[in-house]
Image: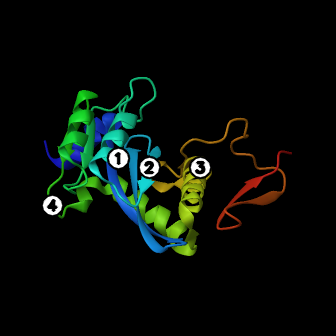
Amino acid sequence: MNWKEFIRTHLDVVAGTDFFTVEVVTLKGLITYYVLFFIHLGSRKVWVAGMTPHPDEEWMQQMARNATLEQWGFLGNCRYLLHDRDSKFCSSFDEIIKMGNVKQIRLPARSPNLNAYAERWVKSVKEECLSKSTVFGEASLKRALEQYVIHYHAVRNHQAKGNVLLFPSKGKPEGNKQGMVQCQERLRGLLKYYSRKAA
């Protein structure tokens, strides 16, 4: 089975994970934060697991425990986890993920296309949000990521999923063709989306 067939066949039980970095302005100067996230390939649901300037082994162990918690861990319904060979994915992280009954697939070096869903999300969050603003402090970064994830899930159309919303807000009439179009904003206008008022 080639890689494309594997992904297509197992889409609903595969998640990807990766890091991306954000430069954050603090009182001590510019600090690089590492953001760890998981994405479910079938639904495209994203979970920002955590952010830290020092992703050491202890922190990675805690992220793995959070992801595999029996009742509400993000990897609860997944059988496979894709990630690259970054040294931050330490052996103890791997062991905890394995104990959660999730098989890890460590991708070959320099092969971002094999974890394309995760790479595409990084491109989206950076181009649509983080590259258009200056982040002041960890709280500001956390707020920006939380707001972007809500925007990504609830109000941003997704071409690869038939140009629909992934998880539309409850109570919103779908396909409403009546009423005035209104613009709504997040992050002080950085993220904009449009909808019709109920007629």
Q: Nearer the viewer, residue 177 or 57?
A: 57
Q: Compute the Cα span from label 4 to label 1.
A: 24 Å
**Contact between labelled residues 2 and 1, with CB atoms less than 8 Å apart:** yes
Question: Of the residues shown, which amino acid type is indicated by label 4?
Answer: Ala
Query: Alpha-carbon neighbours of circle 4 within 10 Å: few (<14), some, or many (≥20)?
Result: few
What residue is at 76 percent from the left and 50 percent from the top?
177
Mark nearer the N terminus (3 vs 4): 4
Q: Nearer the viewer, residue 179 or 105?
A: 105
Residue furthest to the top in view is: 71
In percent of width and height, residue 111 lies at: 20, 61
Name the front one of labels 3 and 2.
Answer: 2
Q: Compute the Cα span from label 1 to label 3.
A: 25 Å
What residue is at 25 percent from the left and 61 percent from the top?
112
Q: Compute the Cα span from label 1 to label 2.
A: 9 Å
Quadrant in which residue 171 is drawn: top right
Question: Of the residues shown, which amino acid type is indicated by label 3?
Answer: Ile
Mark nearer the N terminus (3 vs 2): 2
Mark nearer the N terminus (2 vs 4): 2
Name the front one of labels 1 and 2.
Answer: 1
Q: What residue is disc 3 on?
A: 150
Residue 109 is marked as 4
What residue is at 41 percent from the left and 61 percent from the top?
122
In percent of width and height, residue 10 lies at: 28, 36
Question: Of the residues shown, which amino acid type is indicated by label 2?
Answer: Gly
